[in-house]
Amino acid sequence: MAGQTQDPQDRRELYIISDGTGETALASTQAAATQFQDDFTVRTFGEVRHESQVRRILERAGEAGALVVFTLVHEPLARALQDRAKKLGVPTVDLLGPLIGSIATRYRVEPQYRPGVLHGFSDDYFQRVEAVEFAVRHDDGANLHTLFEADLVLTGVSRTGKTPLSMYLAQRGFKTGNVPLIPGMDPSRELLEIDPKRVFGLVVDAATLLGIRKARLRQLGAPPYSTYDEPGSVTHELRRARRLFRQNGWRAVDITGKAVEENASRILELFHRRL
């Protein structure tokens, strides 16, 4: 209805607050978000070290009706965040605090409580940064001329979760590209030239995929192509995809009902098995 105020809960925003890069919380939050057919807007606030920063972010979160996910290892700052959030009525999830406390209790060890220590500037850190940049540049079939540099390549029909899985693998340090399979078109030459051991085809149950596409269509307002949400066409696309996977020696990974980290672990298991 014209002029009607939008309910903040309908905006589905997730705020991430971290005293480091925010990558740990981002990976976990994205993995959780993929369990829902709805899209979420994720906003990351890194290098948060002061209460004044926390207050400003929480005020924005309250206005947006957002859920706040945080990884703050400095106990006083984490407590300040929770206290302020409670006053503002902002729901929060502490990803690291309970786990750190459980480890400390179980093994009778004292944590360092050093903000940002997980992502110190090691070789591994820079490798992950490079991998994430690569995944962003090679998302959804972009920059095919440098796809050969990828450690892993994901392919599959539309809405099989290629992008979030690519980003998760990149955060693990693997340069990952993803290339969509388009109805009525042959796979790109660049994709066909990649070592088959590095290519993984994503498939999903037809009914699940149809539901995801219908939800996406409600947001887009118009389908990307005419048969996008037709049951028969969806089934045909998946059959064609499986046939292409077999013909090209690409290993298929069924992502139905699985979290991003589960699918990533399966891909890495298959990848290392054939090295």
Image (cartoon, rainbow, N blue to C red):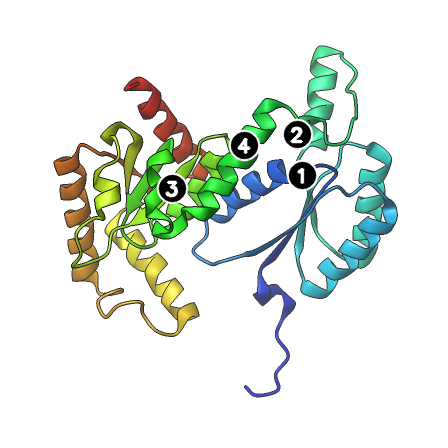
Q: Is residue 204 above or below residue 214?
A: above
In this image, 187 relative to 121: left or right? left
* Residue position for label 2: 119
Name the N-terminal-most of marks 2 and 3: 2
Q: Amino acid at mark 2?
A: His
Task: Measure the alpha-carbon separation of dots 3 and 1.
Answer: 23 Å
Q: Neighbour class for label 3 at 10 Å: few (<14), some, many (≥20)?
A: many
Quarter of the view holding residue 202: top left
Q: Which of 185/49 is in front?
A: 185
Residue 41 point in image, percent of width and height? 57, 57
Task: Measure the alpha-carbon separation of dots 2 and 1.
Answer: 7 Å
Looking at the rendered structure, the secondary structure element under dot 4 is helix
Task: Measure the alpha-carbon separation of dots 2 and 3.
Answer: 23 Å
Q: Nearer the viewer, mark 3 or mark 1?
A: 3
Q: Neighbour class for label 2 at 10 Å: few (<14), some, many (≥20)?
A: some
Name the N-terminal-most of marks 3 and 1: 1
Q: Which mark is residue 128?
A: 4
Q: Neighbour class for label 4 at 10 Å: few (<14), some, many (≥20)?
A: some
Q: Which mark is residue 177?
A: 3
Q: Quadrant of the C terminus?
A: top left
Name the N-terminal-most of marks 2 and 1: 1
Task: Measure the alpha-carbon separation of dots 4 and 1.
Answer: 12 Å
* Residue position for label 1: 21
In this image, 206 relative to 266: left or right? left
Q: Would you say the residues marked 2 and 3 are in contact, meaning their CB atoms lie under 8 Å apart? A: no
Q: Which of 34/9 is in front?
A: 34
Name the N-terminal-most of marks 4 and 3: 4
Looking at the rendered structure, the secondary structure element under dot 2 is helix
At x 83% / y 53%, what residue is drawn? 55
